[in-house]
Image (spheres, rainbow, N blue to C red):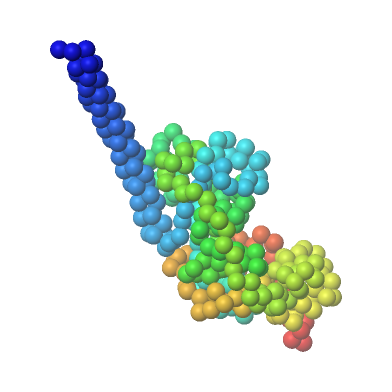
Amino acid sequence: MLNKDIITLHTNKVKKYLAILHARVYNQIIKKFKIRKQAFFNMKEKLREYFLATGIEYFSVLDYASCIETGARIIERASLTPRSVILYLLPYYTTETVNLSRYAASLDYHLAIRTINEGLEKILKEKFPDSKTKGYGDHSPIDERHAALISGLGIAGDNGLIINEKYGSYVFVGDVVTDIPAEQIGAILPMEIIHCEHCGACKRACPTGILRGVGEDCLSAITQKKGTLTKEEERLMQKYNTLWGCDYCQSVCPHNKNPKKTPVAFFYENPIAELTGEILDSMSDEEFSRRAFAWRKRATVSRNIDILNKKQT
């Protein structure tokens, strides 16, 4: 046998050995990947099933590092190392109202978010027993609006609201922050934020002009002020017959034409389309505490009723 034949033989053996070794390593990697992939889809499906059972259709998972942290102290109090965020949109539209913002017609949405977050945290604990989680709604350590937008849950409206493809801007954002690695619960890559068509309807309809850059406060903020209001503030409330909140920028938005009603049962409990002094006085302290406007106390709400009543006399 010639030297070159020996070299060729050994070379072929080495190639064969490397091929077998490569195949084994490859199969191990694939096997491991499939296990992770299966766990990934199982977790995603569990989340989907849970949300659909509560009436929620739109949710997403982000790596915490993709979010804008706005409350470092909030996350410090949670005593966890944030690695992922589960976000969801909670649609709330049920009916038209007379002198209340539509969200205030129902019970306080924070109660619904709290219940949803508790259920979500339970699911995560079952799958990841050693994990730490903390649910939020409004008072979150992240910019919830930004996170929802880069998750593709909606587009950015010129009125500062999230506009969902189905429910328009009549949605709240809830979120649960956890120390579970994002890839283990199906995190997506952040998307580019998409903006609305800038039709200008919301800016033209804004009662105070703040969306046009000429006002100091939005009407909603005025209705939530404590103490005595100025004559101009009272005049605006009377002109727009607004006791609490403001929906004018939402009402004129083309994305809110023929709004879809929420499938979430919570928002149909004890609705109030028009708040009067009689209704307010009939509420027990416990009943009042469950309303969206309760955080500003009875005195503020009662003052607003009196302001609107002045217009009628």
Name the residue located 44 percent from the left edge and 33 percent from the top edge.
130
Can you give x and y, in whole percent of width and height, for residue 4 in the image?
Answer: 22, 16
Of residue 262 and residue 209, the one placed in the foreground of this image is: 209
Considering every residue shown, the one lying at the far left of the view is 1
Instruction: Using residue 148 as the reference point, say whether residue 20 is left or right of it.
Output: left
Does residue 294 appear in this view?
yes
Name the residue located 58 percent from the left edge and 47 percent from the top edge.
67
- The quadrant the C terminus occupies is bottom right
Considering every residue shown, the one lying at the far bottom of the view is 313
Kindly indicate the quadrant of the structure image that contains residue 33. top left
Can you give x and y, in whole percent of width and height, for residue 154 in the image?
Answer: 53, 63
Name the residue located 52 percent from the left edge and 51 percent from the top edge.
190
Can you give x and y, in whole percent of width and height, for residue 228 in the image?
Answer: 82, 68
Of residue 45 and residue 28, the one placed in the foreground of this image is: 28
Does residue 46 appear in this view?
no
Of residue 272 and residue 236, the one placed in the foreground of this image is: 236
**Number of numbered discs visible in the structure rendering:** 0
